[in-house]
Amino acid sequence: MGITSVLKPVILIYECLRLILLAFFAVLQPGSQAFVLVLAAPCALFPLMALFIWLDISRYRVFLPLFTAGKCIGIFALLGWLIIYRQFTIFQGYNGALITGSALLCGDLLTLAAVLAVIRRQNTYMEIPVIPEITGEPETEVE
């Protein structure tokens, strides 16, 4: 299938890494990290959807619009948070580790682009039934 056979596992790996990093920093950061939990809780479904899309796209193609809508909502929420708080740093401090909001935003945008490429490729190869043309004249058998 070309590029989509590479994109599907990349989407899964990114979603798993994002969830692991968000959970890691939610547990290890001192103080109230309610925002981190708000980011991490909905992200638990994205690796599952990416796994199912990678395993059998024909069976689970109904997840593609859901995945796309979730990514769009997540991008707008993260972008809104970055603009409101006027900072591009979400996590800072644990042994000098720094995960920036702009890095998460770029990763989400690239994931959204990859999902849109998979959707476009899937729609190109979908089987469309051919309906015979009706002329109104009865068919005659030729002997």
Image (tube, rainbow, N blue to C red):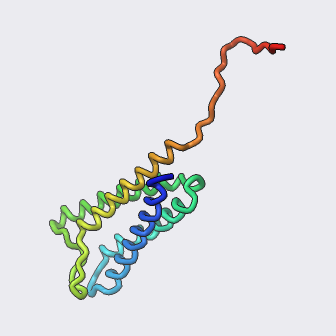
Give the answer, above or below, for where 51 lies relative to 143: below
Q: Position of residue 97 (x, y in %)?
A: 24, 82
Residue sticking out furthest to the right: 143
Query: Residue placed at 35% from the left, 57% from the top?
Result: 73
In the image: residue 46, left or right of residue 77:
right
Q: Where is residue 10 in the image (x, y as percent from the top left)?
A: 42, 64
Q: Where is residue 130 in the image (x, y as percent from the top left)?
A: 62, 31
From the viewer's side, name the closer residue of 13 and 74.
Answer: 13
Q: In which quarter of the image is residue 38?
A: bottom left
Query: Residue placed at 30% from the left, 61% from the top?
Result: 77
In the image: residue 135, left or right of residue 54:
right
From the viewer's side, name the closer residue of 29 and 115.
Answer: 115
Q: In which quarter of the image is residue 29?
A: bottom left
Query: Residue placed at 58% from the left, 58% from the top?
Result: 56
Give the answer, above or below, for where 24 lies relative to 8: below
Query: Residue placed at 30% from the left, 73% from the top?
Result: 35
Q: Position of residue 44 (x, y in %)?
A: 45, 70
From the viewer's side, name the closer residue of 131 and 4.
Answer: 4
